[in-house]
């Protein structure tokens, strides 16, 4: 899940469901378009 701001509920839910969570700056988040492929590393 890509987020700009994360609270404890979101972080806990992602951790329990084993969903990767990463925090992006506003400019990074705004640059994502439908169908974009994101790679971490």
Image (cartoon, helix red, strand yellow):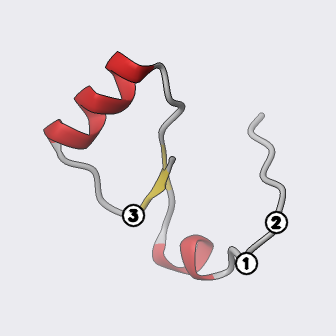
Q: Quadrant of residue 3?
A: bottom left
Give neighbour class at mark 1: few <14, some 14-19, many 20+ (Cα, 10 Å).
few
- Where disc 3 sits, the SS reads loop
According to the picture, the residue beneath numbered tag 2 turns out to be 36
Q: How dense is the environment of label 2, judged by Cα within 10 Å: few (below 14), some, or many (20 and up)?
A: few
Q: What kind of element bears circle 1?
A: loop
- The residue drawn where x is 82% and y is 66% is 36
Where 33 sits versus 15, above or below? below
* Residues under numbered marks 2 and 1 in contact, where contact means CB atoms less than 8 Å apart: yes
Compared to residue 22, the image places residue 16 above or below, namely above
Q: Residue 10: x percent and y percent? A: 26, 42
Q: Residue at x 24, y 27 (%)?
A: 12
User: Mark 3 highlights which residue?
Assistant: 4
How far is the residue under mark 3 from the one under mark 1? 15 Å
Residue topped by disc 1: 33
Across and down, in percent, residue 29 comes to 56, 72
């Amino acid at each position: 899940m890509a987020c700009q701001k994360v609270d404890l509920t979101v972080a806990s839910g992602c951790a329990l469901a084993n969903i990767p969570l990463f925090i992006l700056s506003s400019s990074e988040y705004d640059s994502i378009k439908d169908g974009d492929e994101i790679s971490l590393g």
